[in-house]
């Protein structure tokens, strides 16, 4: 791979909440990189973001930004349906990419991206499953890797949001939220998910009309583990992400959020984060820094296109399980050698 320059010139595609936060992160937190271009279909928004960064140009066409001489790498933070075209354009320019999840919105398009990258003969994409860079999840992964607790038997996950954004659907609980637990399951356990079942109680009174919230999702894995996910996106009180692994000789849990407990006025308690950016700020910082460091070394590390494809396939199975009921198998192609 080509060794990148000392300071990486990054184009950020998509300047909404996530993209704008990545621009801030690269400029204020990350070392070894600077934002040299931003892209958004909303030209005025792109210009507004670019105006806050010295030497940054604004574009409405991702390919035009990628053709710029001062762009060495790309962050894709646009809506999921736009990812495939942006990734294929990056491949044409031989640019390394950090692509926010989803890789693409469905397994068929994800497979096209996988085959296009595989044709290059080397990885170009790191997928933005940022929980792999969270300090607590990293400790849990390390502990499981020692084998001290024995073989993982079950993994319990809880994923709660204060309220769902406008326009959300029952399927988006899976495609936009449980997608993280899908990747965490595969990464922590080292297993592929082979089947999905989705159960839903009577919806919460806090859920918007027509949304089946909460949901209880069950994964089966090729390593013989059973995984459950409680997804509740209108819990009303805060943002919580928790995981507990039950193994042959013990258990381990992360996400309790008890870094500080206060005692005052006859009560004890702590603070519950209100959104994902607050809860996983450090993980995003660590993720982007790892991507920049690897890119400057001429490497691509972290979650791969295979990981993005596998999660897309699990999402499709889970949506079918939600709609039709029952257990739905997950169908994957054989894993190419590039991703072993």
Image: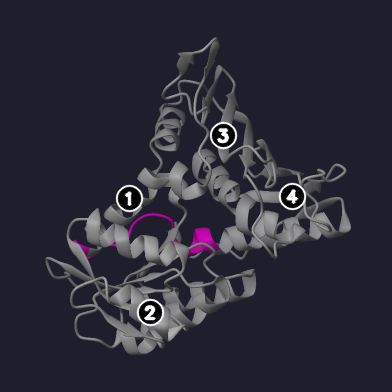
Left or right: where 301 falls relative to 219: left
Which label lies toward us, 1 or 2?
2
Which residue is at a point 65% across and 59% down the rendered structure image?
175
Please tell me whether residue 98 is drawn above or below residue 230 in the rendered image.
below
Q: Is disc 1 placed on a helix, strand or loop?
A: helix
Which residue is at a point 61% across and 65% down the rendered structure image?
333
On the image, which quarter does residue 39 sit in?
bottom left
Mark 4 and mark 1 in contact (Cβ < 8 Å)? no
Q: Is disc 4 placed on a helix, strand or loop?
A: strand
Residue 39 in view here = no
Which label lies toward us, 2 or 4?
2
- In this orientation, which residue lies closer to the viewer: 186 or 337? 186
Give the image location of residue 32, x and y in percent.
17, 60
- Cα gap from disc 1 to disc 2, whole angstroms: 22 Å
Q: How crowded is mark 2: few (under 14 residues within 10 Å), some or many (20 or more)?
A: many
Q: Is residue 55 magenta?
A: no
Provide the residue designation for mark 3: 242
The quadrant of the image that shows the C terminus is bottom left
Q: How crowded is mark 1: few (under 14 residues within 10 Å), some or many (20 or more)?
A: some
Provide the residue designation for mark 4: 196
Which residue occupies the extreme front position in the image?
265
Q: Residue 46 carries which label?
A: 2
Q: Is disc 3 placed on a helix, strand or loop?
A: strand
- Cα gap from disc 2 to disc 3, whole angstroms: 36 Å
Which numbered disc, 3 or 4, marks the residue that appears first in the sequence?
4
Mark 3 and mark 2 in contact (Cβ < 8 Å)? no
Left or right: where 166 falls relative to 149: right
Provide the residue designation for mark 1: 285
């Amino acid at each position: 791979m080509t060794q990148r320059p000392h300071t990486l010139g990054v184009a950020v595609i998509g300047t909404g909440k996530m993209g704008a936060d990545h621009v801030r992160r690269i400029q204020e937190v990350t070392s070894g990189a600077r934002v040299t271009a931003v892209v958004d279909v909303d030209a005025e928004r792109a210009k507004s973001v670019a105006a806050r960064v010295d030497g940054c140009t604004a574009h409405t066409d991702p390919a035009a930004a990628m053709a710029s001489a001062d762009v060495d790498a790309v962050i894709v933070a646009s809506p999921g349906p736009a990812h495939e075209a942006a990734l294929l354009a990056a491949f044409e320019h031989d640019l390394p990419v950090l692509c926010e999840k989803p890789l693409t919105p469905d397994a068929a398009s994800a497979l096209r991206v996988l085959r296009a990258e595989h044709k290059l003969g080397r990885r170009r994409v790191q997928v933005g499953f940022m929980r792999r860079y969270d300090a607590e999840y990293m400790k849990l992964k390390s502990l499981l890797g020692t084998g001290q607790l024995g073989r993982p038997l079950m993994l319990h996950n809880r994923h709660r949001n204060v309220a769902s954004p406008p326009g959300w659907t029952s399927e988006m609980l899976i495609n936009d939220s449980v997608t993280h637990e899908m990747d965490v399951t595969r990464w922590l356990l080292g297993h592929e998910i082979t089947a999905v079942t989705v159960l839903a109680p009577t919806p919460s009174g806090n859920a918007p009309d027509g949304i089946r919230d909460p949901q209880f999702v069950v994964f089966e894995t090729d390593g013989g583990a059973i995984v459950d996910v409680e997804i509740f996106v209108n819990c009303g009180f805060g943002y919580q992400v928790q995981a507990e692994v039950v193994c042959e000789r013990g258990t381990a849990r992360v996400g309790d959020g008890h870094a500080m407990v206060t005692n005052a006025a006859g009560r004890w308690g702590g603070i519950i984060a209100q959104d994902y950016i607050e809860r996983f700020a450090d993980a995003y910082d660590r993720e982007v820094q790892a991507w920049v460091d690897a890119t400057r070394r001429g490497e691509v590390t972290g979650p791969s296109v295979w990981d993005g494809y596998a999660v897309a396939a699990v999402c499709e199975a889970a949506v079918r399980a939600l709609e039709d009921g029952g257990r739905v198998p997950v169908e994957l192609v054989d894993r190419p050698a590039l991703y072993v």
